[in-house]
Image: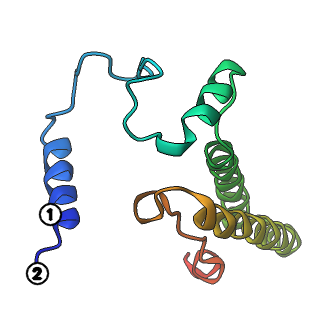
């Protein structure tokens, strides 16, 4: 049996690499759909309408932003760990990285449980041991 999702994803990835999506009309701008035009809302139509009127986003979207920010913080601390001049600074950076990466991984676990399209939106946790051992 064919895995159509995988085949479609490969075709999209190939098209993206070949520049098929470059310079599309409206690229980088939010979609302007009327309330009746979004076929994916289903039962959440009223909730999304209320969120739009309040200039808010669904919880999982806000959480995705927080995870990205936390990941950037972890990368910054990891750079500090890798460029530490003294063992004391390296130990401090390692402890900071472990704490922040654990917090990141907890957020990722929660996000992966609540995001609506887990097969495409799920995020991988940070492999703390691998990050600290790669030099």
Residue beneath label 2, please? 1
The C terminus sits in image quarter: bottom right
Judge from the rendering whether residue 27 lies leftward or rightward of residue 67; answer left or right.
left
Tell which of 69 and 129 is nearer to you. 69
Give the number of callouts: 2
The answer to whether 16 is drawn above or below residue 96 in the figure is above
| Residue 32 screen position, x and y as percent | 42, 17
The answer to whether 44 is drawn above or below residue 4 in the figure is above
| Residue 97 screen position, x and y as percent | 76, 67
| Residue 86 screen position, x and y as percent | 82, 69
Judge from the rendering whether residue 103 lies leftward or rightward of residue 24; answer left or right.
right
Instruction: State the residue at coordinates (17%, 59%).
Output: 10
The answer to whether 126 is drawn above or below residue 80 in the figure is below
Instruction: State the residue at coordinates (77%, 73%).
Output: 98
Instruction: Write down the quadrant of residue 91 in the picture.
Output: bottom right
Regarding mark 2 in the picture, which secondary structure is present there? loop
Residue beneath label 1, please? 7
Instruction: State the residue at coordinates (48%, 63%).
Output: 118
Here the colouring is: rainbow
Name which of mark 2 and mark 1 comes first in the sequence: 2
């Amino acid at each position: 049996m064919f895995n159509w999702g995988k085949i479609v994803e490969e075709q999209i990835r190939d098209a993206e690499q070949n520049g098929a999506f470059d310079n599309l009309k409206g690229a980088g701008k939010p979609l302007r759909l009327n309330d009746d035009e979004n076929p994916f809302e289903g039962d959440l139509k009223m909730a999304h309408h209320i969120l739009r009127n309040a200039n808010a986003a669904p919880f999982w979207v806000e959480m995705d932003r927080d995870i990205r920010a936390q990941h950037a913080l972890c990368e910054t601390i990891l750079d500090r760990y890798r460029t530490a001049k003294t063992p004391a600074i390296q130990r401090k950076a390692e402890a900071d990285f472990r704490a922040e990466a654990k917090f990141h991984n907890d957020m990722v676990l929660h996000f992966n449980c609540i995001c609506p399209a887990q097969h495409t939106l799920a995020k991988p946790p940070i492999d703390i041991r691998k990050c600290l051992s790669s030099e």
